[in-house]
Amino acid sequence: MQLTGTAALVTGAASGLGAATAAHLAGLGAHVYGLDLPKAVESATPPEGVTLLGADVTEEQPVRDALAWIAFDGHPLRLTVNCAGIAPSARIVGRRGPHDLDLFRTVLNVNLIGTFNVMRLAAEAMSAQEPDEAGQRGLVVNTASIAAFEGQVGQIAYAASKAGVAGMTITAARDLAQFGIRVVTIAPGIVDTPMMASFSDEIRAGLAATVTFPQRLAHPEEYARLVAMVADHDYLNGETIRMDGALRMSAR
């Protein structure tokens, strides 16, 4: 699928995986529209070719408004990448009692429901586009995590939400096949995002040492390149791809 001259929608685009993906896709000639919370958009400086729009991915109308903006600009929406997510930590039972139920709901709401919300609305917009010569109308790339398969202590909410994202993949691919829309999920390992920057060098080195090879943290740009590779590879569909340096998470 060719990206040049088309529109791409990236969530969580003000920082981390989303920002790297938006910049990379713009460099490939796509017209990129990045969604993030309004406060994050206000403080971000988007690269050339990226338009940032304030929207909460868990709400329907702001996402519809963003898609209307894209349609008004006139470039066919071919790619949607869901990067928005949160990763608070809490055990099922801790020193202060049981896991906060509202926190669990919030994590699922952002990571799983937010991903589904954007996917369903973007797919609706894609389905109205003219197909390319191969019958394709678009691609949705969702972001899970290797925590979906090997969640660590304290990751119960995060692991559940990301397992849900991975679990949607094949069904979403089957649902959207009639419209010529592919669905692929990427499950990153430990990525050097701004969240990781708050950790000490010692902790970062310890995390890197757990990776089989290459023994380092992944770069956000490597995620972005994988998104572009999936877009270019028309036969990838309904699959969850681990990007983790062969890391298998231990319990702690």
Image (tube, helix red, strand yellow):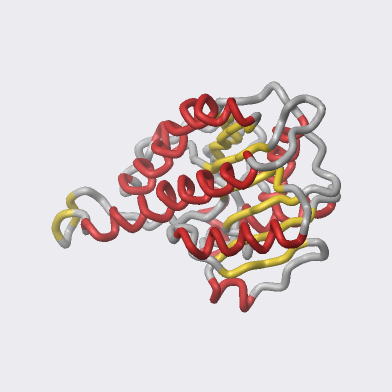
Residue nearest the viewer, comparing 87 with 39: 39
Q: Nearer the viewer, residue 190 or 140?
A: 140
Query: Which of the two residues, 23 or 218, is positioned nearer the viewer here?
Result: 23
Image point (65%, 29%), residue name: 180
Q: Is residue 101 left or right of residue 164?
A: left
Q: Residue at x 61, y 53 (%)?
A: 192
Q: Residue 78 location, x and y as percent?
A: 71, 43
Q: In the displayed structure, does residue 89 sit left or right of residue 203?
A: left
Residue 209 appears in view: no
Q: Which residue is pictured at 61% across the width and 62% down the height?
A: 66
Q: The N terminus is located in which quarter? A: top right
Residue 96 is situated, as x and y percent measured from the top left of the image, at 16, 62
Query: x, y (%) of residue 48?
Result: 82, 65
Q: In which quadrant is the C terminus drawn? A: top left
| Residue 6 seen by the camera | yes
Left or right: residue 133 versus residue 212 is right
Looking at the image, which residue is at 85% across and 50% down?
29
Picture layout, residue 175 above or below residue 98: above
Q: Residue furthest top?
A: 235
Q: Position of residue 239 (x, y in %)?
A: 56, 26
Count of numbered circles on the image: 0
